[in-house]
Image: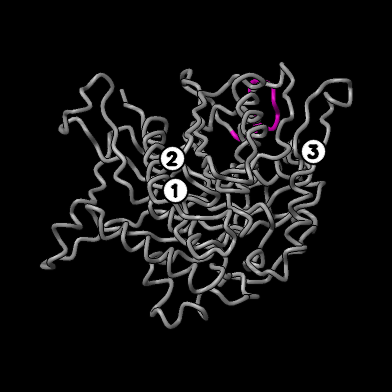
Amino acid sequence: MMMSTDNNDDDKRGSHGPEEDATTILCSEWMPLNPESLVAAPCLLEQTLCQPSDDVQNPRLAKDPLYAQAVLDAWKQDEQESEHIWQTEWCHCRYYSFQNDDGDDETKKNGSKTPLYGHLVRRQAPTVLMGSSSTLKAATTTTTTTPSATKAPGIILFHTGAGPHDLFLLYKAAALVNHPWRTTKDGDDDENDDDHWAAPPPVVLVADTLSDDTGWAWDSNHRSRYNQERDQLLAPLPSPQQQQGGNHYHRSLLRQRVLAAIRTIQNSSLPMMVDANRLAVLGWCFGGHPVMEVAKLQSPSIRAMATFHGVFDGTLFRQEDNNTSTNNPEVASTQTKLDQPLPPPEVLICHGDQDPFVSSESLEGVLALLQVDLAYHRTSLLQLAGAKHGFTNPAQDYNDNPAFQYHAPAAHKAWRQTLNMLQRTLFPPYS
């Protein structure tokens, strides 16, 4: 991996550099990630997190101070209620998608590339301070792992219409890497704590689909730019099968961005070991679209998918019967050889029944896509009574649009079921 703190951007549609390969990542230094490291005092919220920025290393992270404060308060509460100390670090990263992303590396080099701007989040190694009153609590963050657990799973987060530089997504990434994941020996009683081992925490990528370098998606003055990017991402393009009379469509540009995110989290040169075959993707609001594009890939490397108040308009593009992961070149570039067959990937759709942006027709259509057209996943729909759009984010209580509202019971239930799904699929019993 190429490590860099250089803020000079490549051209948005520049040529593929001679010293870069399809998985080049430009990553800044690792920094502590917690509410205190992000803002020193409440009076600094606006100037620290909410101002327009032209600095790639310091993007805008929140809509306004009310948004920022609501997320930070929820973050602090989760930290305080945890049984162990949260120790999180992050870095900004720049990675690339390629116009010819369904070809080999040589084909990619002959196409144009687009820089994408995300964040990598991981758990810090625990530090026990000798003689400190925090020693006992810090000791609960033991890194003891199973003898065979040498790699961590990877989780990709897909953003809302606010873009990848969202304080809320950093909060959820921190929650994921600090969750007490456990695994057991195959055949042992799950209730026997002696048979439980602490599992290596996941590495999380907050992925970018907009090529948003500075958090411009937050700015209301850039709504027309966002709408243009969104329309391009969601434009369905016919595949060669469809051009020959079939019915297979996919969203070419969105798929390029999705494949770039998968390759990035799988990158073997990252400074942490990620198991390329234990991946999950989560998406909020607009992030429902890339999650469905991942589902269409039918990759055995993706073990779990979840959407939260995801929107799915226009995603109902049937797959060809023979477009499976075994003969799909796009999937082949994002997976490694599996030692043994795996159970079907799980999909969890968390939907508020008062969400005006998700019609019953589009929801039924997505379920048909997953259960009938693809017939590859184990799909669950979690219907949440009384929940509106944005129900997972406490900052939505300050949204003037009545279609949005935080719903604590729905948010907690959706998150709990997601954690249970990730526990089953990313941390299975070892032999």
Within the magenta stretch, is there residue 326? Answer: yes
Q: Are marks 1 and 2 in contact (CB under 8 Å)?
A: yes
Q: Secondary structure at mark 2?
A: strand
Furthest residue to the bottom? 43
Q: Is residue 8 left or right of residue 422?
A: right
Q: CA distance from mark 1 to mark 3?
A: 31 Å
Residue that appears at 82% across and 30% down: 239
Q: Position of residue 378 (x, y in %)?
A: 50, 23
Q: Amino acid at mark 3?
A: Pro
Q: Secondary structure at mark 3?
A: loop
349 lies above or below 27: above
Q: Position of residue 221 (x, y in %)?
A: 72, 71
- Assign the N terminus to one quadrant of the image: bottom right
Q: Are marks 3 and 2 in contact (CB under 8 Å)?
A: no
Q: In the image, which residues are magenta?
A: 325-334
User: Which residue has dot 3 on it?
Assistant: 236
Q: Amino acid at mark 2?
A: Pro
Q: Quadrant of residue 294?
A: top right
